Image (cartoon, rainbow, N blue to C red):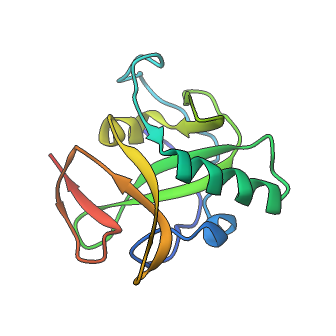
Amino acid sequence: MIRRFAGFLIGWNPIFNASKLKYSIRYANWRFDRMLHSPSTLKVTLTEKAAEKVKLAMQKQEKPKSGLRVYVAGGGCSGFQYGLAFDDKTDGDHVIDSHGVTILVDEQSAQYLEGSEVDYVESVMGEGFKVNNPNATEACGCGHSFKPK
């Protein structure tokens, strides 16, 4: 269980824009009663294109040592929404390396993100990060929120 959470969520556009990562969350005093996943078994990946965009954004924001936190928070049209943030590792985090980028996932989010892939998509509608989540049974029309299995 999360005992304390403080932060801001990324805006409501259908895909995450790399320039908005600076307006992301900060976690404070995370504590968990138990781990649901072994740190070595959680699988969350970035595509090569997403990893390149993350590295570029880290350089622009002068945060080369930070990790990319991928998280799930309550809210959105379907019940849960995704978030991305540059952050430092905290106790209880899963730490995953994908194409040279350190991915940080808290235990609460891990149960919803297992097997997910973060991609960077460019289309007529815009460009930004998109989470491909095999655990989502429904997704909102905005593409930002989902309903888990």
Residue 68, placed above or below residue 40: below
Residue 99, placed above or below residue 12: above
For the point 49% across and 42% down, the residue is: 3
* Place of residue 80 in the rendered image (x, y in percent of width and height, measured from the top left): 31, 59
Decide which of 93, 67 is in the foreground and name it. Answer: 67
Residue 43, placed above or below residue 132: above
Q: Quadrant of the C terminus?
A: top left
For the point 31% across and 65% down, the residue is: 145
For the point 54% across and 45% down, the residue is: 48
Taking the image as drawn, is residue 59 in sight?
Answer: yes
| Residue at the bottom extreme, as displayed | 124
Where is residue 35, by image quadrant? top left
For the point 33% across and 35% down, the residue is: 114
Q: Quadrant of the N terminus?
A: top left
Left or right position of 61 against 104: right
How many marks do you count on the picture? 0
* Place of residue 143 in the rendered image (x, y in percent of width and height, measured from the top left): 31, 70
Decide which of 62, 111 is in the foreground and name it. Answer: 62
Taking the image as drawn, is residue 4 in sight?
Answer: no
* Place of residue 20 in the rendered image (x, y in percent of width and height, measured from the top left): 62, 71
Residue 78, placed above or below residue 110: below
Left or right position of 94 against 58: left
* Place of residue 132 in the rendered image (x, y in percent of width and height, measured from the top left): 32, 51
